[in-house]
Image (cartoon, rainbow, N blue to C red):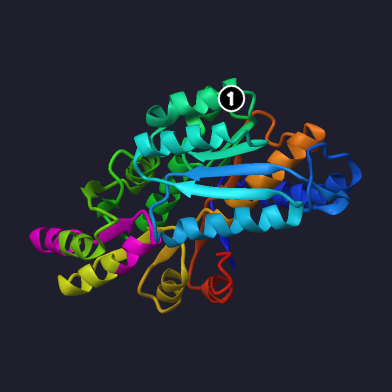
Amino acid sequence: MIRRVPRGWLVAVFASVLLVSACSSVNAVNRPHNKAGGGKGGYKYKIAVVTHGSQGDSFWSIVKSGSDQAGKDMGDTVTYESSGDPNEQSQLIDAAVNTKPDGLVVSMANPQGVRAAVQRAVAAGIPVITINAGGAESKAYGALTHIGSDETVAGQAIGTALKEAGVKNVVCVVQEAGNVSLEQRCAGVKDKLGGKVTNLQVDNKNLPGAQQVIQAKLQQDPSIDGVVTLGAQVATVAEEGISGAGSKAKLATFDLNADVAKAVLDGKILFAVDQQPYLQGYLAVVMLTQYKSNLNVLGGGQQVLTGPTLITKENAAAVLKLTAGGTR
């Protein structure tokens, strides 16, 4: 079964209610924008998505799949741009604002770095929803709501599970410098592990190099008995690094892809924390459509949570079947 951590916030209920309401209210209300194809009645909204995702990162491919599918389901036009550099991401946000979209979806790995651009969008009267990262700053920047996982709670879930597995000395592998959400994850692990947690910086754009850094760290300190990675692609090279170092360290990771699901199923990864990126992309577009068409906002001033959920050996097979469709 899927193991949910404490404080389960009824995320599934949120999602179910939202999708049901989307099917009913979008068809029931007048959507006064471009009469040019799209949904029933020929109306269409233009939604811009600008994230901090790196090119080729499977996680962000899933987010994009979600936003694209929501655009098709809602009859909206959805554009997607991304850059891991906050200055470049800010430029992309400004460029999107200049196209006068009906709504904007933004992830904020470096909240301060994109603050001005997000606030310019809000000042221009564009409804903004933040996803994935930057939940703590989202409301202050003027966004309608934030969709994602509570990173500290997710880290605490891993820390608790590793403690139960007898792990005492963890290296937490950070693949994006300056990403506040990743730092929160490691802090959460440390909070609940009750042992030693050391952050290790690698570059997710250089996965072979990341493997070498992890392997060298394990060779340098044989007492390390746990490795936590903060992204699915880094988990794969961490697995190789552990093997190359001759280490018996247990591996756990945040985020999911087919390789991670199979490794969990095979017992090579202890578990993965899933934040359901497909829902982050999908719900953001649906919620902006609902806001534009009917002034609906979910969350009651709080974040709309899509995680965390633990993927373990018991439920990995079911999830693995879904990864081929690009939704998990």
79 over 231 or under it: above or below: above
Query: Extreme front residue here?
Result: 36
Number of other residues with Cα within 10 Å of mark 1, as a class: few under 14, some 14 to 19, many 20 or more: some
Q: Is residue 225 magenta?
A: yes
Q: Does the magenta stretch include residue 321?
A: no
Q: Residue at x 40, y 74 (%)?
A: 263
Residue designated by label 1? 122
In the rendered structure, the answer to whether residue 295 lies left or right of residue 7 reads right
User: Residue 27: image x %, image y %?
Assistant: 87, 48
User: Residue 21: image x %, image y %?
Assistant: 82, 47
Screen quadrant of the N terminus:
bottom right
Q: Residue at x 42, y 35 (%)?
A: 91
221 over 121 or under it: above or below: below
Question: Which corner quadrant of the image does residue 290 belong to?
Answer: top right
Question: Which corner quadrant of the image does residue 216 belong to?
Answer: bottom left
Q: Can residue 10 be seen in this view?
A: no
User: Residue 298: image x %, image y %?
Assistant: 71, 37
Q: What stretch is highlighted in magenta?
A: 215-236
In the rendered structure, the answer to whether residue 18 lies left or right of residue 144 reads right
Q: Return the residue nearer the eye: 155 or 211.
A: 211
Q: Residue at x 54, y 37 (%)?
A: 96
Q: Return the residue nearer the eye: 222 or 41.
A: 41
